[in-house]
Image (cartoon, grey):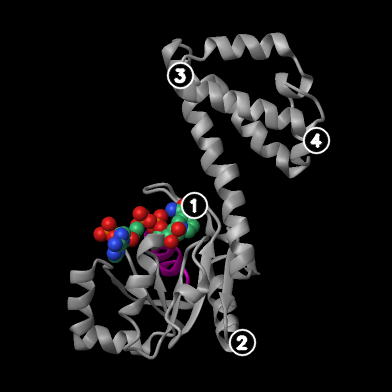
């Protein structure tokens, strides 16, 4: 049985709680709030202190900018402390503790259930026994466990932002364009699904279609004229240029 203390009550914490509670191999000891006042008060409580000391692992699932300061509150304990961020180095955690990373590579939103079994969990630790423990813990909820260094994780996180956050923002722009022109965004959903599903069998290079790849300048000009927002025009121009450069053509 792996005993876990979770710190933070946001999206990732909630999803991890649900996943850990569904497995018999993990005992979720406690979930602590991470805000300074609440955490300081909690850490003065003897029962909470005992549970931290008895935990095999403490997972800090808080916003990236707060990881360093929240982790400093745990230097008084003899615990194995990990964070869940894609972009924060393992070296941002206190040097005096055994530390690591437990980064689930997925997009988590409130009230949206995810199947953890297929989510890659990127782990990192300095000590071999800690790496083994992270493997063991990650395998209780996922079949995809990968040892990834802080440097490689940063690159993965950047790639994740490009493929997920930026794609989603393009959905938003497409959504607004549909609303402005009173056509249902729903009509685009099979296209959105197929674009993602193609990655199961094609490389992104093979899957690319559209006016930029075809160098269809008339359509490109018409689209640029249709877009009213200057930022959206700029995004369209840049992405078109990027696709054309990738396929060796000029805008
Ligand atoms: N969401 C994702 O898709 C995702 C995926 C993989 C990894 N991650 C990583 O997981 C971590 C948590 O992300 P999340 O999505 O769960 O974030 P979130 O839902 O925004 O929750 C952030 C948590 O951090 C706390 N917090 C924020 N500022 C703080 C501060 N100054 N001091 C102390 N606590 C503070 C918040 O407390 P309050 O509730 O009091 O505001 C909340 O508990 C981040 O490192 C993130 O990069 C996120």
**Distance of label 4 from label 2 (alpha carbons):** 41 Å
Name the secondary structure under disc 3: loop
Q: Which residue is mark 1?
A: 114
* Circle 1 residues within 10 Å: few <14, some 14–19, many ≥20: some
Q: Are marks 2 and 3 in contact (CB under 8 Å)?
A: no
**Distance of label 4 from label 3 (alpha carbons):** 31 Å
Mark found first going from the N terminus, 1 or 4: 1
Query: Residue at horizontal 61%, vertical 87%?
Result: 128
Q: Which residue is mark 3?
A: 229
Q: Ligand 1 shows up in which quadrant of the image?
A: bottom left
Instruction: Note whether ligand 1 is within 8 Å of mark 2.
Output: no
- Front residue (pair 84, 154): 154
* Circle 4 residues within 10 Å: few <14, some 14–19, many ≥20: few
Query: Residue at horizontal 72%, vertical 22%?
Result: 212
Mark found first going from the N terminus, 1 or 2: 1
**Distance of label 1 from label 3 (alpha carbons):** 35 Å
Q: Are marks 4 and 2 in contact (CB under 8 Å)?
A: no
Q: Nearer the viewer, mark 1 or mark 2?
A: 2
Q: Which residue is mark 2?
A: 128
Residue 198 percent location from the top left of the image: 72, 37
Mark found first going from the N terminus, 1 or 3: 1
Q: Nearer the viewer, mark 1 or mark 3?
A: 3
- Front residue (pair 115, 163): 163
Q: In the rendered view, would you say 197 is above or below 66? A: above
Q: Quadrant of residue 153?
A: bottom right
Does the segment drawn in magenta span residue 36? no
- Front residue (pair 110, 206): 206
* Circle 3 residues within 10 Å: few <14, some 14–19, many ≥20: few
């Amino acid at each position: 049985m792996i005993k876990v203390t979770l710190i933070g009550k946001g999206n990732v914490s909630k999803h991890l709680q649900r996943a850990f509670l569904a497995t018999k191999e993990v005992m979720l000891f406690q979930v602590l709030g991470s805000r300074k006042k609440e955490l300081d008060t909690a850490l003065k409580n003897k029962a909470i202190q005992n549970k931290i000391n008895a935990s095999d692992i403490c997972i800090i699932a808080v916003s990236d900018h707060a990881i360093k300061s929240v982790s400093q509150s745990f230097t008084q304990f003899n615990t194995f402390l990990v964070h869940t961020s894609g972009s924060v180095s393992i070296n941002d955690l206190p040097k005096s503790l055994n530390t690591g990373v437990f980064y689930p590579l997925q997009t988590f939103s409130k009230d949206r259930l995810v199947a953890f079994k297929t989510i890659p969990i990127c782990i990192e630790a300095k000590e071999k026994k800690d790496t083994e423990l992270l493997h063991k813990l990650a395998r209780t909820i996922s079949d995809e466990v990968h040892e990834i260094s802080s440097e490689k994780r940063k690159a993965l996180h950047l790639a994740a932002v490009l493929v997920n956050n930026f794609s989603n923002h393009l959905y938003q722009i497409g959504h607004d364009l549909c609303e402005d022109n009173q056509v249902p965004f729903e009509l685009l959903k099979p296209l959105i699904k197929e674009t993602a599903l193609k990655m199961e069998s094609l490389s992104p290079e093979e899957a690319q279609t559209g006016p930029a790849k075809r160098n269809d300048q008339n359509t490109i000009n018409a689209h640029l004229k249709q877009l009213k927002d200057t930022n959206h025009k700029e995004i369209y121009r840049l992405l078109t240029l990027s696709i054309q450069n990738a396929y060796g053509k000029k805008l």
